[in-house]
Image: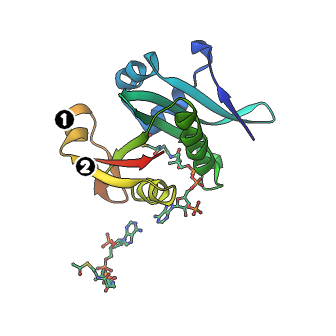
Amino acid sequence: MEIHQITDKKMVPMNLLLLADPNQQIVENYLGDGYCYGAYQRGNLIGVYVLIKKSSGIAEIANIAVQPDRQNEGIGRKLIEHAIGEAKNLGFEHIEIGTGNSSIGQLALYQKCGFHMQTIIKDFFTDNYDEPIEENGITCRDMIRLSKQL
Ligand code: ACO
Ligand code: ACO
C-alpha cells in the first residue's frame, strides 16, 4: 500500500469523505485549506484522510475513511500513523481528532493509536447536522475530542 498527497482537487474522493462526515459543506470547508492524502493499492484508492492546521502548533485529522469492503484490515491505523508522521514533519506539536459519542470502534482505534480524550463538545452533531445519526444503537449527539503529543 502507498500513501501520498492528492494535490489535484478534482481527484479528491468526496464519496469516501462523506462516509466519515455526511455534511458536504463542512467537508468542503476543511478541504479548502487542508492536505488530502490517499492510500492506494494496485492503483485503486482504498482510503483517505484530511490533515488541517487547527491552530498554532496543532494539526487535526479532520476526516478519515476506508472503503467499506476494506475496513478492519489495518488500513485506518496505517493512515493515522502516516498522519502523525506528516504532522510531525510539518512542525506541529500536537495532533487532534474528533468523533461522535456513538463511534465506539473509532474511539477504540484512536486510543490504540495513542490519542487521549480531551474535551466534549456537547450537542455538536445535533446542532450542526440536519439528519439524525445513529450508530451501535446510540444517538450521535456530542463530539469527543482526542489529542496526541507529537
Ligand atoms: N472495540 C474495540 N476495538 C475496536 C472496536 C470495538 N468495538 N471496533 C474497532 N476496533 C479496533 C479494531 O480491533 C482495530 O484495532 P487493532 O488495530 O488493534 O486490530 C481497529 O479498531 C480498527 O483498525 P483498522 O482496521 O486499521 O481500521 P479501518 O481500516 O476499518 O479504518 C475507519 C477505520 C477509518 C474508522 C473505517 O472503519 C471507516 O472508514 N469508517 C467509516 C467512516 C468513519 O467513521 N470515519 C471516521 C469518522 S471521524 C473522523 O473522520 C475524524
Ligand atoms: N459496542 C456496542 N455495544 C456494546 C458493546 C460494544 N463494544 N459492548 C456492550 N454493548 C452493549 C450491548 O450490545 C448491550 O446493549 P443492548 O442492551 O442494546 O443489547 C449492552 O451494552 C450490555 O447490556 P447488558 O447485557 O445489560 O450488560 P451486562 O449485564 O453485561 O452488565 C456490566 C454490564 C455491569 C458492565 C457487566 O458487563 C460487568 O459487570 N462488567 C464487569 C464490571 C464492570 O466493568 N462494571 C462497570 C464499571 S463502571 C462502574 O461500576 C460505575
Q: CA distance from mark 1 to mark 2?
A: 17 Å
Name the foreground residue: 136 vs 86: 86
Query: Residue 62: horizontal and vertical position, in percent?
Result: 42, 34
The residue at which mark 1 appears reads as: 127
Q: Residue 29: where, in percent of width, then height?
A: 38, 19
- Residue ID for mark 2: 119
Residue toward you, 148 or 35 = 148
Residue 95 location in percent, x, y?
A: 43, 41
Question: In this orientation, which residue lies closer to the viewer: 62 or 137?
Answer: 62
Residue 6 located left or right of residue 100:
right
Q: Is residue 124 left or right of residue 38?
A: left
Give the secondary structure at mark 2: strand
User: 125 and 36: which one is in front?
Assistant: 36
Where is 97 relative to 36, above or below?
Answer: below
Pointer 1 with pointer 2, Cβ within 8 A: no
Residue drawn at x 36%, y 29% as measured from the top left: 54
* Residue 141 seen in the figure: no
Residue 1: quarter of image:
top right
